[in-house]
Image (spheres, rainbow, N blue to C red):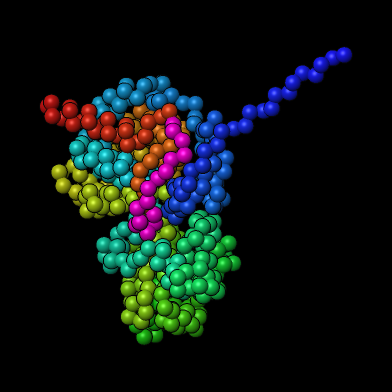
Amino acid sequence: MSVAEPTTEPKLPTLKVVEDATCTFCGCVCDDIQLKVNTDDSQIVEAKNACVLGKSWFFNHHIEDRPEATIEGRPASYEEAIDRAVEILLNAKYPFVYGLSDTTCEAQRVAVAIADWIGASVDTTTSVCHGPSGIAFQGVGEVTCTLGEIKNRADFLIYWGGNPAESHPRHFTKYSLMPKGMFLPKGRKDRTAVLVDIRKTKSAKAADIFLQLKPRSDFELAWSLRALAKGIEPDPSVEEKTGIPLDTLRDVMDRMKNAKFGAILFGMGLTMTRGKHLNSEAILALARDMNRHTRWVAKPMRGHGNVTGADNVVSWSTGYPFGVHLGRGYPRFNPGEFTSTDLLARGEADAAVIIASDPMSNFCQAARDHLQAIPSIVFDPKLSETAKVATVAFTTATYGINVPGTVYRMDDVPLPLRPAFDSPFRSDYEILKAIEHKIRQAQLAN
């Protein structure tokens, strides 16, 4: 008679719950995410409240089997790589610091300090997305508010040159179109939504009015609305230019004037087309003009998780948001001259610090060619195309998932990060701080 062997039950994973975690995938920076983490293999297994993009951000994160750093492709320790990075920066005559939009404000501050110590240019990814808006803010100002005010008060919304349904999925449901607010108890039923775009996107299905304008005519449309806001009849040629009948524009303007609280939320479809900063100026001026009738605001829809933080840090450090040269001992702002893609395309820069960005994947060919030809120092959790060609590449921990700190939501509200689990790699802040310390030691010694 045989005796059955005792069965062993499979070991259940050890789970940790992180309440009110912050998703740093996009500029919405949703801070109500509940994460479940398998602490046995440091893997996030559930991200409650996250959108499809947020879930992808959390679920696809894993600790890569990479060396701490590489120097010209060979594995190296952090200490050795830091020494090589310091040597490159001290020997450079025209270095620049670029990226910053996917790291903490604490790391951004140190990066700007390093740029100041070595007389570099400092630039953020804003220069290739909402840079025109940054220029426009200085020209006409910004009538602004928080996303909480939009949620609670805005009964008229204009989405211009963006596709929030796909680029910022929770913006509709958490901040603007759908949620029930303090003064909008019926949520979507209390709101009117207008979408302005050159094509029908998924966001068009959520809008009450879709204005399909002809490409490269945003400026003319915005100024026509400004004219109507001031009681001036636009030239009839605007219909042919924009493809939108004047009667439709008059109807929209009447609705805008009758709104209690309106918000224009504009994206890169406005800033990266013909007109650029003049388009942004027209939108910001339109919001200002509308305040003669009722309350209106205008806000850019920001992409990267902490690009707004990068703009804030560079602004409070230098007085300007991006494309700032510090080589003369004081900040000089000149987009097109001191912005990174232009410095590279003209072959002027002789060293680069790339933080949490991948210009080898999105800069023009001339800029990529020159970046590959000069010494570069790259900070990235992943083996990006830029990290592959870097002279010194640091493998870093991921902010928000492994690293605490501060980030700014697209409405300039700072939020704390609550990391899910530790990483064996150092943070951007720790490495940058070590580089700054050694640069100062070397400069003081001389």
Q: Is residue 190 left or right of residue 5?
A: left
Q: Is residue 192 above or below residue 21?
A: below
Q: Residue at x 50, y 80 (%)?
A: 248
Q: Is residue 395 left or right of residue 344?
A: right
- Is 385 in the magenta? no
Q: Is residue 368 visible?
A: no
Q: What is the quadrant of the N terminus in the image?
A: top right
Pick whichever, 263 or 175, lies toward us. Answer: 175
Principal SS element in the magenta part?
loop
Pick whichever, 44 or 137, lies toward us. Answer: 44
Q: Horizontal and vertical percent for residue 58? A: 52, 42
Farthest residue to the top: give it: 1
Q: Horizontal and vertical percent for residue 204? A: 56, 66
- Specify the segment rendered in magenta: 409-423
Q: Horizontal and vertical percent for residue 276? A: 37, 61
Q: Kindly indicate the quadrant of the structure image that contains residue 356.
A: top left
Q: What is the quadrant of the C terminus in the image?
A: top left
Q: Horizontal and vertical percent for residue 365? A: 42, 42
Farthest residue to the right: give it: 1
Q: Residue at x 51, y 65 (%)?
A: 179
Q: How many marks?
A: 0
Q: Is residue 83 visible?
A: yes
